């Protein structure tokens, strides 16, 4: 049996799509935070593969580099540092879980019906344009980002700035009893202010002997 | 390539962004108990932005729309009018914030920088001409708002409120984005005007309607319309009053602009759908807002529910056709002025360690200061819509537009619940004038804050003079969309 | 500076000053407050005089322009606009001049009052409102000014809000004026119904075509539309210009500070009704019935209110009743179509009555705020300037030939005599006898206050001295026009056709022209002629009686009082107007209100409709409150469920 390239692509797509959804569900269902984070990493990887399928190599690589390489590592780091307790099953009331499932099911059914019946054949499905060899994905993303979408791009930059400012503002604040070190103060300290050389008279040995006697 | 001249329409945005960074830096060198210079910088920024925005609107010169940044940014009369209102609102927000933060010895540059960033977000939303730009503006505003709510780090209520706001906001953003992507999927473009052309003639496309629903959820959340209002009371109550004051005012204008840009401009073909959805939101909001408000003893919470009902009224206007949109615009402008004044009064009466956010804190205000009681009376009566205050006319215009469109039942329900709503406003007035004060503490505020508050409240009367002019402007700018 | 700018400055400068003094009173301080307000009113005054001079020299043409369209609903558009012609120019000058004098005077009079800035803010605001009233070019703005001056008047009557009597007077003025304003509003409504517009010029142009229009009010009787409109409008004027029986508030309004009595309750606001009727002369000329009504009301007020003045002991109340009586004269003049004479008397009266009031105020300052004339006497040696100016004012008031009051009052009396309107004979007798009465109470006031024995207590006597210059300067400045203004202006104003652009008189009714033709040669001649007419002798008689009783034989006063006890009692009780109002109108409404309150309000509306529904709503809102639990996942759940419901409704419908 010969597998045609199209079929092969489809198989790949469905395998990885299933993995994506499965790992995404695992992220929210597993109780261990570490596992949860690792499933998220898996989810990202699978998504990256899906992007590769539509020849968005640059985005796929970026996703792995940025999200998996930086964000998730940081995330894991924080989770482990903070020693987050595992969520106990009893904390979530069963009734809520059931209600949530019910609602999710309702929504799913709605969407399925919608896509199956109401929308048959109306979705505009442009064929994916296959590019020539040597076509630079990076250059194209760059061009689009810095010409057509330069304004949203700048705004996104401002959002990041705000995120930084907000994060710093909310965390870097002096608290009562905070034992933070101030490097400049440590360096600028003058030994003369801290240490006092006290010259004392040498004590006589007899007194020590006396005290020992008293103890005994 | 861009030429400098192409940036001219975006000068106000550029100014606000630059000044936000400047304020951020200046804030580092400012004492927590002072910070007058920061406020000065912020206010000046708004004034210059207003000049930049208004300078092309001198009489006798034809104003034309400009679209720049490859169609992602539009400058038109509608946007400019809303922006000017936002500047004015922000100026008063800055003064009240100064008063509030000084009371708590916690005046930092970041607060004002974040306010300026939020203002930038609002401006981006007002002049967004592309779904991505609109969405990013929204996020910029939202992110700044979350941080502003959590500003008092040691305040548990504030943190809780920020957390709720953040989670629900993320949910709503997700839905909005989902709706936008559905619409993008259907039409293949994100440009406001192109969407409008692309969907012309296919108004029964359920795919678009599904997208529309999610978009409306996002807008409804931002506006705080029921049933997407649940965050409003908790956040209003938990946030520092200065932040509440901000959230209650300028962002509503941005959300209104968002609604007009997305619904009125790009999805105009689907009007028949979104009108009925908005009518539902409007009526539910008016009912929920007024009924819940009756039970409140906390003034911030009460104002939160009253906001919901006011938003309902505003949405009702959007159902009322072309004139209705103008009426809505007028309504939201008037409402934000009232809201800023109302919360400003809470700020004024608060002092270190005590937030005057209970209705009981207003007991006997008339004995403590007749002038402030009078100002509060004006604000509250205007919110309730007592004639001849401006709040009455804004309701009147909305109802007129709705009735002209033949939605008499909607108008009737709105009026009935507005009357029910009058009850809790009257309660405040009763408490101020007919009950004994529990404290005789002097009301201590700096001159500028008092002046701003007085202007704010007297505007409820003073705007009557400008009433027709303002409304004519609303009609004109919404007509020119 | 063009006309429009000038007029805007005249009208709005006092408003700006009032806003500054009122809102930033504490910041600008006392000196700041009075400097700003006096500066603004002074500016208005100077510009008003300039406008008036332009009209006198014939350089200006009547100005009529809408400045701002406030609202357009259907066919009705409401504007803010100015109509300035000779009539308005005179009013503007009078208002701003008297107001300026009162402003200056107030510095001295209110110097120790804690509400100093507030007071200045009010009187500036009043000036603005009054200017809006006189400068209006449409009924809407007229009504705005009308109500605004009323508002400030109530605020000022009740200025000393801790004084019981002031509060009572305040409420009384408010309620009585409501009656008048109701009529006024009906009149404006009738104008709108008949003419379809509120613009003066349009209304006046259409008026001749509407003369025969009728209206059915009750039953099948046809009423002339013009008569209905004019009487309704005049009821408004009766309220504001205190004509019987709506005069009861004016004497009580003397509870306010004296500068207010001078400015509002003598010189300007109370003449608004006179001004309004003159302004509406094209309408009033259409209805002889309405004019007869006006005339008889005026005649009644002129004579009978003067009589009450004779028995009053409060110095301000005497002048208040004198004001009522003089307003009656003006109303009579309106009634006989001598509008220009009414305006002329309005102007002269504004000067000499303001002078008398401010003089009384000066006396009151010296007496430490005691107002009873029985405790005064012999003040002339302590307060020479006040004394002399008071004499000037009194002579002008009683109509001594040559002084301003003589010209205006005599013109009215002659005009009434010449008129052949129904009832003018009665009116003529009333105004003639009124001269005697005026003279009697005026000289009585002078004698009791300035002459004779010093009856005040020892403590007061020690501190008697002339008032400071800020008080006496306005007196002197007002005394000058009180003497000369009549002489200077009678000829152009009455006979020179100065107000022809503003006032319309049917040729058959034009009594003023008749005076000009047959009774008036030159001003000096007219003045000399005054020494041989009946009114002069009546005035002398009044003088003689007053002199005899109060200078020579004081015992006679009490003898007469005993002899004529019933009449005296009637006068003391002010003909029972107050008692009647108090008992039947006020008492009746209170009883009716109580009955309504008990039955319909508290049982039906409160018990069932209001409380019942409030309880229901409360229950509902308590019930649904549990949704707002505070848990974030509840909130998220509500959102998501809502989305599902929305999709269900709108996609699968």
Image: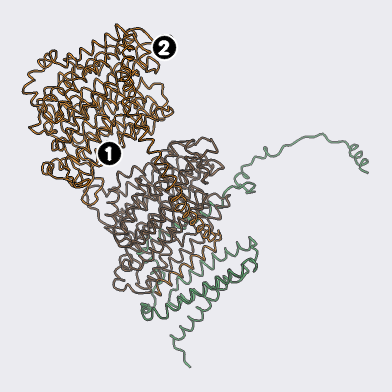
Chain colours: A green, B brown, C orange
Instruction: Give percent across and percent down for residue C418.
Output: 11, 25
Q: Nearer the viewer, residue B261 or B440?
A: B440
Instruction: Give percent across and percent down for residue A29.
Output: 59, 71
User: In the image, are marks 2 and 1 on the same chain?
Assistant: yes
Q: Are there few (<14), some (14-19), or many (20+) residues within 10 Å of tag 2?
A: few
In the picture, the quarter occupied by the N terminus of chain C is top left
In the picture, the quarter occupied by the C terminus of chain C is bottom left
Query: Would you say the residues marked 2 and 1 are in contact, meaning their CB atoms lie under 8 Å apart?
Result: no
Q: Which mark is residue C439?
A: none
Mark 2 or mark 1: which comes first in sequence?
Answer: 1
In the picture of the structure, the residue carrying the numbered disc 1 is C144
Using residue A214 as the reference point, say whether residue C50 is left or right of it.
left
Q: Which mark is residue C460?
A: 2
Q: Are there few (<14), some (14-19), or many (20+) residues within 10 Å of tag 1?
A: some
Foreground mark, 2 or 1, reads 2
- Visible residue check, residue A166: yes
| Callout 2 secondary element | helix
Relative height, residue C109 to residue C223 (above, below) = above
Q: Chain of mark 1?
A: C
Instruction: Give percent across and percent down for residue A139.
Output: 39, 69
Instruction: Give percent across and percent down for residue B51.
Output: 32, 46
């Amino acid at each position: 049996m010969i597998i045609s390239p199209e079929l092969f692509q489809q198989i790949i797509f469905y395998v990885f799509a299933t993995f994506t959804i499965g790992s995404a569900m695992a992220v929210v269902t597993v109780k261990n935070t570490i596992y949860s984070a690792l499933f998220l990493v898996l989810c990202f990887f699978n998504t990256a593969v899906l992007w590769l399928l539509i020849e968005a190599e640059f985005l796929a690589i970026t996703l792995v580099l940025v999200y998996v390489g930086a964000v998730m590592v940081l995330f894991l780091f924080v989770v482990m540092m903070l020693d987050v307790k595992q969520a106990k099953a009893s904390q979530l009331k069963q009734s809520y879980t059931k209600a949530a499932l019910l609602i999710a099911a309702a929504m799913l059914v709605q969407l399925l019906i919608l896509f199956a019946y109401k929308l048959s054949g109306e979705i505009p499905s442009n064929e994916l344009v296959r590019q020539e060899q040597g076509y630079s994905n990076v250059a194209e993303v760059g061009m689009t980002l810095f010409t057509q979408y330069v304004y949203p791009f700048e705004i996104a930059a401002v959002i990041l700035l705000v995120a930084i400012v907000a994060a710093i503002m909310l965390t870097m604040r002096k608290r009562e009893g905070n034992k933070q070190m101030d490097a400049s103060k440590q360096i600028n300290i003058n030994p003369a202010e801290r240490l006092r050389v006290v010259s004392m008279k040498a004590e006589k040995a007899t007194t020590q002997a006396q005290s020992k006697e008293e103890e005994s | 390539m861009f030429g400098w001249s192409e940036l001219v329409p975006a000068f106000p945005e550029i100014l606000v962004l630059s000044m936000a960074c400047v304020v951020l830096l200046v804030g580092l060198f400012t004492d927590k108990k002072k910070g007058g210079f920061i406020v000065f910088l912020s206010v000046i920024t708004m004034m210059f932005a207003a000049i930049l925005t208004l300078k092309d609107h001198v009489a006798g010169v034809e104003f034309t729309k400009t679209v720049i940044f490859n169609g992602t940014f539009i400058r038109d009369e509608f946007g400019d009018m809303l922006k000017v209102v936002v500047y004015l609102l922000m100026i008063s927000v800055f003064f009240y914030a100064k008063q509030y933060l000084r009371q708590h010895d916690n005046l930092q540059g970041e607060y004002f920088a974040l306010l300026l960033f939020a203002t930038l977000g609002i401006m981006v939303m007002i002049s967004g001409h592309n779904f991505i730009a609109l969405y990013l503006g929204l996020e910029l505003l939202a992110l700044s708002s979350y941080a502003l709510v959590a500003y008092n780090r040691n305040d548990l209520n504030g943190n809780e409120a920020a957390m709720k706001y953040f989670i629900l906001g993320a949910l709503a953003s997700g839905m909005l984005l989902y709706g936008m992507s559905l619409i993008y999927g259907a039409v293949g473009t994100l440009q406001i005007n192109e969407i409008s052309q692309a969907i012309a003639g296919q108004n029964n496309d359920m795919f678009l309607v599904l997208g529309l629903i999610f978009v409306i959820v996002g807008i409804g959340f931002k506006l705080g319309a029921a049933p997407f209002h649940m965050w409003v009371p908790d956040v209003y109550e938990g946030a520092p009053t200065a932040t509440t004051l901000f959230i209650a005012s300028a962002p509503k204008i941005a959300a209104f602009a968002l609604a007009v840009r997305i619904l009125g401009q790009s999805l105009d073909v689907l009007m028949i759908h979104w009108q009925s959805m908005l009518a539902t939101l409007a009526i539910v909001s008016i009912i929920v807002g007024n009924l819940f408000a009756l039970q409140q003893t906390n003034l911030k919470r009460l104002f939160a529910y009253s906001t919901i009902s006011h938003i309902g009224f505003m949405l009702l206007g959007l159902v009322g056709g072309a004139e209705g949109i103008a009426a809505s615009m007028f309504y939201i402008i008037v409402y934000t002025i009232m809201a800023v004044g109302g919360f400003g009064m809470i700020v004024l009466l608060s002092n270190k360690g005590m937030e005057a956010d209970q209705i009981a804190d207003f007991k006997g205000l008339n004995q403590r200061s007749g002038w402030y009681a009078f100002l509060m009376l004006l604000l509250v009566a205007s919110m309730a819509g007592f004639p001849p205050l401006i709040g009455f006319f804004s309701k009147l215009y909305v109802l007129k537009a709705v009735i002209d469109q033949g939605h008499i039942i909607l108008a009737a329900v709105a009026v009935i619940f507005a009357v029910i709503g009058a009850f809790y406003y009257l309660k405040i007035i009763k408490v101020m004038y007919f009950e004994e004060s529990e404290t005789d503490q002097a009301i201590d505020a700096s001159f500028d804050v008092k002046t701003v508050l007085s202007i704010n409240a007297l505007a409820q009367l003073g705007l009557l003079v400008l009433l027709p002019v303002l409304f004519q402007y609303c009609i004109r700018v919404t007509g020119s969309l | 500076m063009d006309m429009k700018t000038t007029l805007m400055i005249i009208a709005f400068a006092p408003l700006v000053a009032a806003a500054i003094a009122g809102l930033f009173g504490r910041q600008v301080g006392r000196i700041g407050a009075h400097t700003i307000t006096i500066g603004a009113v002074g500016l208005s005054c100077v510009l008003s005089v300039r406008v008036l001079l332009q009209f006198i020299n014939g350089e200006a043409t009547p100005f009529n322009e809408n400045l701002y369209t406030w609202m357009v609903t259907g066919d009705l558009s409401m504007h803010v606009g100015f109509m300035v012609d000779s009539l308005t120019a005179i009013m503007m000058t009078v208002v701003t001049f008297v107001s300026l004098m009162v402003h200056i005077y107030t510095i001295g009079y209110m110097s120790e009052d804690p509400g100093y800035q507030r007071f200045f803010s009010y009187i500036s605001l009043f000036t603005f409102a009054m200017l809006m009233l006189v400068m209006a070019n449409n009924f809407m703005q007229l009504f705005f000014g009308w109500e605004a001056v009323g508002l400030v008047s109530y605020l000022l009557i009740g200025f000393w809000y801790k004084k019981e009597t002031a509060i009572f007077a305040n409420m009384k003025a408010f309620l009585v004026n409501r009656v008048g304003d109701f009529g006024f509003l009906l009149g404006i409504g009738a104008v709108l119904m008949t003419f379809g517009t509120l613009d003066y010029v349009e209304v006046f142009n259409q008026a001749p075509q509407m003369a025969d229009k009728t209206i059915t009010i009750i039953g099948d009787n046809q009423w002339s539309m013009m008569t209905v409109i004019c009487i309704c409008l005049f009821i408004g004027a009766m309220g504001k210009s205190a004509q019987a029986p709506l005069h009861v508030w004016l004497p009580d309004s003397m509870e306010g500070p004296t500068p207010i009595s001078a400015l509002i309750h003598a010189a300007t606001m109370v003449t608004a009704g006179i001004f309004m009727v003159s302004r509406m002369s094209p309408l009033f000329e259409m209805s002889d019935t309405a004019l007869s009504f006006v005339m008889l009301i005026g005649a009644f007020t002129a004579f009978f209110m003067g009589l009450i003045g004779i028995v009053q002991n409060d110095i301000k109340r005497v002048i208040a009743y004198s004001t009522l009586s003089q307003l009656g004269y003006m109303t009579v003049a309106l009634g006989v179509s001598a509008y220009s004479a009414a305006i002329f008397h309005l102007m002269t009266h504004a000067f000499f009555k303001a002078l008398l009031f401010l003089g009384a105020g000066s006396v009151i300052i010296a007496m430490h705020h005691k107002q009873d004339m029985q405790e005064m006497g012999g003040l002339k040696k302590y307060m020479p300037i006040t004394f002399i100016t008071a004499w000037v004012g009194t002579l002008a008031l009683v109509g001594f030939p040559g002084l301003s009051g003589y010209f205006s009052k005599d013109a009215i009396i002659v005009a009434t005599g010449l008129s052949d309107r129904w009832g003018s004979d009665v009116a003529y007798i009333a105004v003639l006898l009124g001269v005697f009465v005026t003279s009697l109470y005026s000289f009585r006031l002078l004698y009791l206050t300035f002459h004779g024995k010093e009856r005040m207590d020892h403590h007061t006597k020690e501190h008697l001295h002339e008032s400071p210059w800020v008080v006496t300067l306005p007196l002197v400045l007002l005394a000058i026009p009180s003497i000369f203004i009549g002489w200077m202006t009678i000829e152009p104003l009455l006979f020179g056709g100065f107000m022809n652009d503003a006032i319309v008189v049917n040729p058959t009714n034009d009594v003023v022209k008749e005076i000009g033709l047959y009774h008036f040669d030159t001003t000096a001649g007219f003045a000399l002629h005054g020494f041989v007419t009946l009114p002069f002798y009546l005035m002398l008689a009044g003088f003689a009686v007053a002199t005899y009783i109060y200078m020579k034989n004081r015992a006679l006063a009490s003898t007469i009082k005993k002899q004529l006890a019933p009449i005296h009692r009637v006068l003391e009780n002010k003909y029972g107007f107050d008692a009647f109002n108090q008992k039947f109108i006020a008492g009746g409404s209170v009883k009716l209100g109580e009955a309504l309150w008990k039955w319909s309000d508290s049982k039906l509306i409160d018990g069932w409709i209001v409380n019942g529904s409030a309880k229901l709503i409360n229950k509902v809102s308590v019930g649904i409150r549990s949704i707002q639990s505070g848990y974030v996942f509840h909130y998220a759940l509500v959102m998501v469920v809502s989305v599902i419901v929305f999709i269900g409704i709108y996609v699968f419908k």
